[in-house]
Amino acid sequence: MSKKNPDKLLVFALGGVGEIGKNMYVIQYANDIVVVDAGLKFPEEDMLGIDIVIPDISYLLENRDKVKGILITHGHEDHIGGLSYVLKQLNVPVYGTKLTLGLIESKLKEAGLLGETKRIVIDADSVVELGTIQASFFKTNHSIPDSVGVALDTPEGTIVHTGDFKFDYTPVNEQYADLQRMAEIGRRGVLALLSDSTNAERPGYTPSEKNVGEGLEDIFHKSAQRVVVATFASNVHRIQQVINAAIATNRYIAVVGRSMVNVVSIAADLGYLDIPEGMIIEPEEVNKLAADRVVILCTGSQGEPMSALTRMARSTHRKVDILPGDTVIIAATPIPGNERYVGRTVDELFRLGANVIYGPGSVPGVHVSGHGSQEELKLMLNIIKPKYFIPIHGEYRMLRQHAQLGEAVGIDRSHIFVIDNGETVEFQGGIGRKGSKVQAGNVLIDGLGVGDVGNIVLRDRKLLSQDGILVVVVTLSKQDGGSIVSGPDIISRGFVYVRESEGLLDEANKIVSSTLNKLMHDKVNEWASLKTNVKDALGRFLYEQTRRRPMILPIIMEV
Amino acid sequence: MSKKNPDKLLVFALGGVGEIGKNMYVIQYANDIVVVDAGLKFPEEDMLGIDIVIPDISYLLENRDKVKGILITHGHEDHIGGLSYVLKQLNVPVYGTKLTLGLIESKLKEAGLLGETKRIVIDADSVVELGTIQASFFKTNHSIPDSVGVALDTPEGTIVHTGDFKFDYTPVNEQYADLQRMAEIGRRGVLALLSDSTNAERPGYTPSEKNVGEGLEDIFHKSAQRVVVATFASNVHRIQQVINAAIATNRYIAVVGRSMVNVVSIAADLGYLDIPEGMIIEPEEVNKLAADRVVILCTGSQGEPMSALTRMARSTHRKVDILPGDTVIIAATPIPGNERYVGRTVDELFRLGANVIYGPGSVPGVHVSGHGSQEELKLMLNIIKPKYFIPIHGEYRMLRQHAQLGEAVGIDRSHIFVIDNGETVEFQGGIGRKGSKVQAGNVLIDGLGVGDVGNIVLRDRKLLSQDGILVVVVTLSKQDGGSIVSGPDIISRGFVYVRESEGLLDEANKIVSSTLNKLMHDKVNEWASLKTNVKDALGRFLYEQTRRRPMILPIIMEV
């Protein structure tokens, strides 16, 4: 496509639209491709057994010589979590701010890719030349420091990608969103804006992260015992505020949970956390201190089964117990789909006698979102003043709500493109239109397997999960016109509790025998036909008896 | 227990505490047992393949001669959905108000139990003698008409069970909660209150259902095309308000979805819905009318996969299509766990070009809860003024929050019992204490099977759903010291996409062969040992290669 029309500008997503997660946006002008972000997504509820999901990058691999680099807007998993998988197949330079690269490097080290990956630190004043495309950046506020938006100047015009953002007028680290630069970019003229739609359904403004600091300090003051704070490991601002509240209330901090330890260490090393000497204690030391001198900062705010807080709640954590009278703060809201897990954890903490601060009653006291609400999204649209608008980073309904906000601030409906992954928007001569589709989709990662689980495997897992499986083993003789030599033996897993269903399985056995005997009497002896008939007869019988449809696997042997 | 202490009063739950759903409460004095409600629960996320969950009623079956009757507080599934299963095993009289019994009867008819079940209609003025226990009732407000609370006078004192309730001072049907009777019961003295904890986490007051009527009428007015309203079928008040808004905007109503048709028919027949003659049209007639003359009232507010709205959203409904410009109102909030389903449905409706009104931005405009918030729960505690308090109907965290409200209104902490299912509270001589436990738990219903799926089956389904299954079939000869006659053949389901993993499966085959050959060479020939060794060797190999742990089923035959 790009060969036929070498002077077109293409903008599309390989991930991140119509979903929350696996963000990857592509800007291509002629032979220059710039990628923004390379994230992962957590599996949907129907992706059974899948660990993570990354974007299908076939398009980039087919055009590998054109890819000039990957710009990373910030260090969240949905923006950097797919990077190792991408770089394994496509060794291109990676650009990110200091903290972002710090987090990426720890991933690349694990994947054995650190040596061979070219990493370029940028800051908000950097300008990066990527063929005919020039990238510059602007500071934004988000729930992780060092987040930036990107302006990509191309021969067709400027494309602005906001990254994830909110407008926090009182940021914790005093790193203000660069409204002046955004205004300057807007003044020069922007062809198209790609903007974060996460909170496009939410009216008003998202409160400042500073609110949380006040809420935390208040709770720390009132607690006569230990305080446990669970939050997202990557929320360095929040972590700083936990530290500040601990200082104010004369408490030490134990950091618990692998990713929390990792982020605190990276952020402190790179100067993004200000921690007084001697304030951090080992989890083992918690019990040696008076209860009102202790804060435990941990992972598990989503009720993840293996996380630190979940283990504490179940009394299976090796180092930290929850004691009656402890205060536990869940400084996060559940991501849709996690509500039940979080609820279970809260229940267990209450059972241990903890005072648990969680849920809607506690927000914005102990949590605020990192994404801008409707009024902030309108501010971004107003300050960038784009000719075209492409809402990104959100489920379809969020993109649509964001599109409506675009119309509300005066962008013509025909200049707003709500796109699916792989659906291109082409710009030529200042005119934008929807173009053709490039390959895009989900690559499922299950253990070490990348892409070896597809729809057939998932369909089978779904079937198996609902009603289990029956394996029917029978041996037929070749000689005497085909009689049953041994079996049928029926082995079931996940179907019924066998000891209570002997009658049913005996009956099933007879159905298989009589089906086979009848077929052999009728001289039907092609294997496929025998198998199909056994499957059908047994399936029908079991459905009548149980209203269940287990998978049936007939194994017919001949001797 | 009751035999040794014939003069004790026992209060416990067989379902409904530590969970939302399968409500069943038991009040026993000596040889008289009264059951309040018999509900179902929808399966938890780890109950794979299960359709519904009902209470374990072993205790009632062991004491079947003592059970005097089942009182039903209102007609919601979590209070009546287990009734058919209970009555099949325990034929006792059922007491309920007119609408409640109407809904029950439609269930009993399906289960073939209508003829043999004694049903007694009560109203708020009824008094029912159940051995030494006397039941009277009081009207409450809830999201279904004809809801009542129950006062049970026993020789040990009065137990009050609120049922599900809110205080709606402007109820849609002008059936006000009977504050006078509650006050009178409280004045006479109440030993213990069992009160609904669903919204114990929510501060303030729950808005009146009337708010929704105004919200609906406003949207109906503004819509130039058809309006689709999805809500809970049982919410007869809401349905009446849809009818009223349709009258006000000169629209006809098509009722779509099995349970919606069923409830509208029962409620209209019994006089709980006021529908003008000729207002209800068949779904087939929708397309014959001008778009601004039509309302479609349907099920599917939870995004349930087979519901009417979900089918419309996926364009698979046989009778109703969503057209661009239609307005769809989801007049409900997602039950925890259903958020993703609802989100998916909203996405699909947006894709069809509908204007969708849903989510937090739309509430309380188009939805309010049927359960009282904290201030209403305090009002109930204040008006009933119980000596003891047992929060019911909620997850553990909700019961705990409700217990805190009890303390806040002045009930002594030692007089508040947060119980688990099966955990009894005993009252004797005016003193309450936690007693011993009776059998309680979940009975899982999968298809026609009641209780034939237990932990082992669920564990297998979980394993199968994560990594699938490999069946290894091999035939050994008995004669020549045991050599492989045929196989090994490996059949996998839900493990890997076979065509892309031939190498892996070939290698797996070799592992099985070499394991068996080595064992036979070492003269190991007990089946159990052969199977275990094959399982272990293959499992180890596959985990190394894939980091997955599929179920492995070795089938070893001898000829």
Image: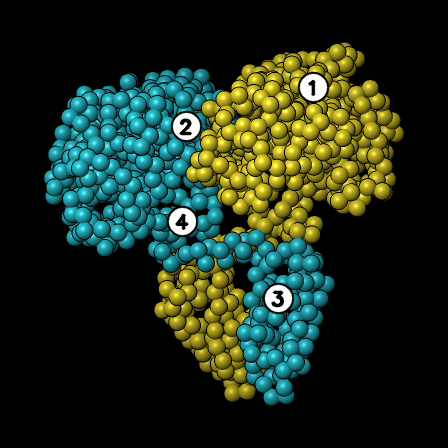
Chain colours: A cyan, B yellow
Instruction: Report the residue at 51% width, 44% height from top.
Output: B315
| Mark number displayed over residue B558 | none
Callout 4 and callout 1 share a chain: no
Picture coordinates of residue A298, whole percent (x, y): 39, 33
Number of residues whose C-alpha sits closer than 10 Å to that of mark 3, classed few (under 14), some (14–19) or many (20 or more): some
What amino acid is found at the position of numbered circle 1 in the picture? Asn
Callout 2 and callout 3 share a chain: yes
Is there CB contact under 8 Å for labels 2 and 3? no
Q: Nearer the viewer, residue A168 or B159?
A: A168
Q: Circle 1 is placed at which residue position?
A: B173
What amino acid is found at the position of numbered circle 4 in the picture? Asp
Q: Circle 2 is placed at which residue position?
A: A201
Mark 4 secondary-structure assignment: loop
Mark 2 secondary-structure assignment: loop
Q: Nearer the viewer, residue B9 or B402?
A: B402
Q: Nearer the viewer, mark 4 or mark 1?
A: 1
Left or right: residue A421 compared with residue B538 = left
Chain of the residue under the numbered disc 3 shown in the image: A
Picture coordinates of residue B224, whole percent (x, y): 49, 26
Callout 2 and callout 4 share a chain: yes
Instruction: Report the residue at 18% width, 48% height from top.
Output: A5
Q: Circle 3 is placed at which residue position?
A: A536
Is there CB contact under 8 Å for labels 1 and 2? no
Instruction: Report the residue at 24% width, 25% height from top.
Output: A385
Q: Nearer the viewer, residue B181 or A133?
A: A133
